[in-house]
Image (cartoon, coloured by chain):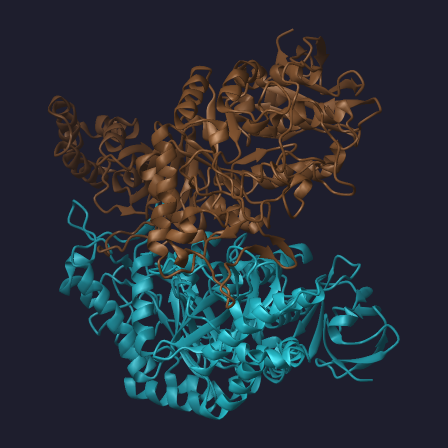
Chain colours: A cyan, B brown
Amino acid sequence: MKPTDQPNGRNRVVIDQIQPVIEGGRYPVRRTTGEWVEASADVFADGHDVVQCRLLYRHHSERRWHSVPMEPVYGHTFRGSFRIQREGLWQFKIAGWVDHPLSWQHQLKRRHQARERLESELLMGAQFLRNVLTRCRAEEQEAVQQLVDLFTDSDRYEQAVQAALNGAAQHWFLAYPADELCTESAVVRIMAERLRARFSTWYELFPRSAASKPGHHGTFSDVQRLLPRLQEMGIDVLYLPPIHPIGLTNRKGKNNSLRARKGEPGVPWAIGNKEGGHKAIHPQLGTLQDFRALLKAAAEQGIEIALDYALQCSPDHPYVKQHPSWFRWRPDGSVQYAENPPKKYQDVIPFNFETEDWKNLWDELKSILEFWIQEGVKIFRVDNPHTKPMGFWEWVIAKIHEEHPEVIFLSEAFTAPKMMYHLAKIGFTQSYTYFTWRQTKAELMDYMEELTKSEVREFFRPNFWPNTPDILPFHLQSGTESVFITRLFLAATLSANYGFYGPVYELMVHEALPGREEYLNSEKYELRHWDWDRDTRLKMLIAIINRARREHEALQFTNNIEFLNIQNEHLLAYLKYDPAGSAHLLCVANLHPDHTQSGFVQVPLEKIGRTEEQEFAVRDLLNDARYIWKGRWNYVELNPRILPCHLFRIEDP
Amino acid sequence: MKPTDQPNGRNRVVIDQIQPVIEGGRYPVRRTTGEWVEASADVFADGHDVVQCRLLYRHHSERRWHSVPMEPVYGHTFRGSFRIQREGLWQFKIAGWVDHPLSWQHQLKRRHQARERLESELLMGAQFLRNVLTRCRAEEQEAVQQLVDLFTDSDRYEQAVQAALNGAAQHWFLAYPADELCTESAVVRIMAERLRARFSTWYELFPRSAASKPGHHGTFSDVQRLLPRLQEMGIDVLYLPPIHPIGLTNRKGKNNSLRARKGEPGVPWAIGNKEGGHKAIHPQLGTLQDFRALLKAAAEQGIEIALDYALQCSPDHPYVKQHPSWFRWRPDGSVQYAENPPKKYQDVIPFNFETEDWKNLWDELKSILEFWIQEGVKIFRVDNPHTKPMGFWEWVIAKIHEEHPEVIFLSEAFTAPKMMYHLAKIGFTQSYTYFTWRQTKAELMDYMEELTKSEVREFFRPNFWPNTPDILPFHLQSGTESVFITRLFLAATLSANYGFYGPVYELMVHEALPGREEYLNSEKYELRHWDWDRDTRLKMLIAIINRARREHEALQFTNNIEFLNIQNEHLLAYLKYDPAGSAHLLCVANLHPDHTQSGFVQVPLEKIGRTEEQEFAVRDLLNDARYIWKGRWNYVELNPRILPCHLFRIEDP
């Protein structure tokens, strides 16, 4: 952090080690509305004088800075905090000064203890008070003047000393600090997003498989019909894969076969044909009017529609003819399709972001977002952002957020953590994660430690998915109900943002391509039909868990988690708490798919505000069972054939 | 680190996590001439293309950047290095680009392995080679053109494929990289100082006590007479406390008594009287001519004179009358003397750095340095820099270094580590440390870890002192010879910069004020006489240790240290090595003052390039004893009554 240049050599205070800050202020810190920013810094000066400082903050639209005093914590470290009240960019900075009146006050006590005469000190105190007089309110002036008179009246020496020592003057020095020679730190930016950036419950479905009867191409109206059951399940974000016209050239068939047979629908991510591109709707799904109706109906149920922002084209996309310079052309005159040799994706061609026409390309790609935002879409799931330039993302997200800070971007970058974190730094709201493959107790604890206890917490918001259309992890392939329950329970309670690839998960679909973590007969390549009327126990549990998430703030923050000792390698136990620290949920999951596991969990009594002797109750929100516990170590037992998890709320007995 | 703004959206490479860097580039990294800068960074781009990067560096006086390629280390991390050739400010930055020809080369192999036809690829390779043609030297053009012809000749397909695969093209792509769309990082600054900044051997004496006969006030000529014995002892910096006229008002007497009796000489740090201030010489020490003679004689012996830069005045200093606004005045009209209530330093008055006339004050204080630099002084020991503003130090050191990068500043700030490290960041060359009080094995190892293995190593150069005129640590107060030997041995081998308060240490003076770590009858307050002709065993050992330091580069770097296992809590063992890793010294110290200690020390055989079976010799440079060792664990035994330390050089047997 480079401090602002100090034009005044008289300013003696140095401010450094400001927290939170990301890469020295290069990227904004991330928060959501309602969250607190706890800022700290080392603030110090030469010598032994008292140093004071305050935290200044404002929304970028405000001219005036708000101000709160910072309190010393230890050594030279001070801390202060403020609450984020609205969306958009915020700024904070720290101002520190050598406070001579308070140094005087501090020294006065030590001089008095050393039995020094204080005449000269009182005169100095009077000088400081006269400075207060120039700034205090009219109705305060008389009180201050009386103190000045007392301090300068040698006949009332003893009375003046007592007044000086008992804080009569200090009151004014704190109210009107002598901060003329104040050092200000550089400004740290904070990007504040809405609550749903931090707390969201996603459901993914392919609208073309939403038809109520097999063999029919689903439509937006079909999706609309499913909204009440989604709402019942506690879903608040419904994510639809690309809804645009699908290319014909090199169209893929069932199970990713190289050539589609006649009538096969193709991959929705092969965007664009003669009917339009990223701003058009696949005619078989419906019209723009139908889509608007779906958006409206969803909003009425408290559900937002998330669209896919997939920056690639089918060879038939109108852009290819309109803007040939936006693509790469091979020496043989063919367009360069997507590949990572020897893998090929012949139905998809990438943009050439190195085109000299990059400014027009960027503008056009931004206009896609603006088009759908205009229609009311405020959430985008971004396909493979790690294969498009970082400079583009930083620019386009900042531009969109200038007008629409409410827009949420979910990054789908299953790649090196370095890149995933970088995408978060440059603006993505949420990110898919490695949760999908973190299975054992140690793996899950290590991963949560990285996400919630390192600096990653300041910019990266995980969104945990037990499955996606691209990933059917091996542990789900047995189809065991307990595993489906546990994985969803973990996703929903470890992370405040989570989602699942819906009908397939509810119905515990688990048939994979042999030896692969991919769905057999994936609906990426074909129409599927799901029994939308079937109510599984899993679906009921999802609804219960999501209700618990809505009703307990503890589950709406990812970072406030503490793992608990439990002497069984298959049992994972953790405490979740709300920011006020007043409500506590204790989660236990049996990670073994088949066998009952038991053990004693160590409850951090101080944290939950109980003593060794105090009884307390734990109510399992999953099945309403209630137990009375006492002391640190308490017994739990989970039979995966019955219910593999506890979601205990700690209550008075 | 804020990257330079990228005017070009086509640049896809991101560069971050640059090392070394201090507070995001706010302060320069520190090196000495001859040292290497090992730079690393995370350099990455979207997608799967090959990313290349290079390290650019220059002395600030150069216009052209030098360039070395950076090599991938792991993940996205690249590393490169360059050697500091001269003093002054250096700059480095990193340039990264997506290398399409190398990506092509990489993919070509994979395509070939997948048995693809490569006609189109060869045409693309020919395009890349044509780009090389526009940049390569005239004599290279024929070779490149032949390759272009081959790649575009369909009749020679097989031959072309072989040429493409065997690196014939790659050779040119590496020589003339396609780096048009190159991203450059921000510039990191490095302050390079001369060797003595890193490796120095200090001796402190009060010139007024240098007289050969008791009862006489020592002079510069007396000091000059002592130079040969200092040179014999291996000293290269002779530090003299302030040599200026001493104030009379409130002059302190023997043992810090409040009033000096007639004839008492006062404290040298109470600078200034009617005979002059910081640019004058105390008449009893000699004239400016005498001082010049001393400097010259010292230089001839390879010894530099370090002066004290103590920014405070006696009440009689000419500044007080000439610039009353540079001091604080109390309401009763008296000048504010130095105090930290209830402690008072009545013979000294501090500058008021908050004066509105601060610019003139800063200029005058800088001119003091310039005055002595002009006379040939290139080393300053700075008294209590933590009680003067940080902004002043950053400014004055930078200003002096602009003209005189050879000037060395030793910071005497015995205060919070935060402040000590900050002073180093803003420019101080070396610093006194807490070594003086680190006594046990654990304390010494922890402290060395902090200094040499954390980021502190990039800016803070410790200077270890076993004693100073202000500190006679309790462990020296018994006067035990073994403790004097061990503490000096530790200072001289743990830190490349060390020093001692000389005659007093040589003679093992240890009488303290009762219960205090202060010398009884300190020469801070009175003239003392020392027996300069007495040769102690300690003096002889100092000479031997300092010769070892001169002859072994391993002892000229503080950071290249590795502590060794040795199963005795009183034995401290460590390996020191030179930057090339070719010469090794193995140090062992018995920390117990009285009792013989023995144990097996674990030798890191890989590090010293020996196998389990190979014998090697260790020669003790202190007494020329030689032992044959073998394998990892070897026996050592140290009797403190004989010699409490080993300084082993590892040799062939």
Quarter location, residue A593 = bottom right
> Which residue is outermost to the top?
B653
Considering depth in this image, is B180 or A112 the residue closer to the camera?
A112
In the rendered image, which quarter contains the C terminus of chain B?
top right
**Towards the viewer: B180 or A547:** B180
Which quadrant of the figure has residue A239?
bottom left
Residue B476 percent location from the top left of the image = 74, 32
Q: Residue A297 location, x and y as percent?
A: 41, 91
Q: Is residue A121 above or below residue B363?
A: below
Q: Position of residue A168 (x, y in %)?
A: 61, 81
Q: Is residue B47 above or below residue A244?
A: above
State left or right for residue B565 relative to residue A175.
Answer: right
Q: Is residue A343 visible?
A: no
Is residue A624 found left or right of A84 in the rendered image?
A: right
Quadrant housing residue A217: bottom left
Question: Measured along the vertical axis of the image, is residue B645 above or below residue A534?
Answer: above
Q: Give the residue displayed 28% in from the left and 40% down from the top.
A: B104
Q: Residue at x 38, y 87 (%)?
A: A294
> Residue A491's spot in the image, x, y percent?
59, 69
> Residue lying farthest front?
B262
Q: How many marks?
A: 0
- The reply, left or right, for residue B349 in relation to residue A330 is right
Q: Is residue A232 visible?
A: yes
